[in-house]
Image: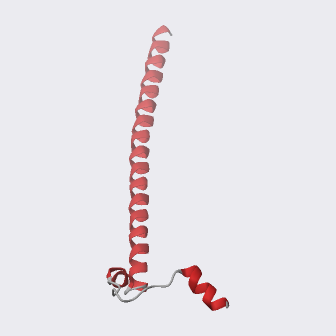
């Protein structure tokens, strides 16, 4: 009977060790999956931001050209409050 008890303890220890190893393996696997998901979310976020920027450029193709265009020296743009006062009176 004493031998049976020792054999039973060894069996429990082996089972416990196998369970601990399996838990560690699963934890490592979950960490890898979570890292992959985080990377996918980051890629999707960057792609979304790039598409948003491209959408503005596509919807306003002359915007950059307008910013780069020089205003002729003879043209004076009215000051907004002055312009508004002229419209009111």
Q: Residue at x 48, y 23 (%)?
A: 12
Q: Residue at x 39, y 80 (%)?
A: 57
Q: Nearer the viewer, residue 29 or 52?
A: 52
Q: Nearer the viewer, residue 4 or 83?
A: 83
The answer to which image quadrant residue 67 occupies is bottom left
Residue at the top extreme of this rendering: 2
Q: Position of residue 69 (x, y in %)?
A: 32, 84
The answer to which image quadrant residue 40 occupies is bottom left
How many numbered circles does the render carry?
0
Q: Residue at x 40, y 49 (%)?
A: 35
Q: Position of residue 27 (x, y in %)?
A: 44, 39
Q: As drawn, is 17 to the left or to the right of 70?
A: right
73 shown above or below 6: below
Q: As drawn, is 71 to the left or to the right of 8?
A: left
The answer to which image quadrant residue 11 occupies is top left
Q: Nearer the viewer, residue 41 or 25?
A: 41
49 shown above or below 70: above
Q: Position of residue 48 (x, y in %)?
A: 43, 69
Q: Position of residue 18 (x, y in %)?
A: 41, 31
Q: Residue at x 33, y 87 (%)?
A: 72
The quarter of the image holding the C terminus is bottom right
78 shown above or below 25: below
How is this picture coloured?
secondary structure
Residue at the right extreme of this rendering: 89
């Amino acid at each position: 009977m004493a031998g049976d008890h020792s054999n039973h303890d060894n069996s429990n220890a082996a089972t416990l060790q196998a369970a601990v190893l399996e838990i560690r393996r699963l934890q490592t696997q979950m960490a890898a999956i979570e890292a992959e998901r985080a990377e996918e979310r980051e890629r999707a976020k960057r792609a979304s931001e790039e598409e948003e920027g491209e959408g503005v450029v596509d919807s306003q193709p002359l915007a950059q050209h307008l910013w780069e265009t020089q205003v002729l020296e003879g043209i004076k743009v009215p000051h907004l409050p002055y312009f508004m006062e002229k419209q009111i009176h």
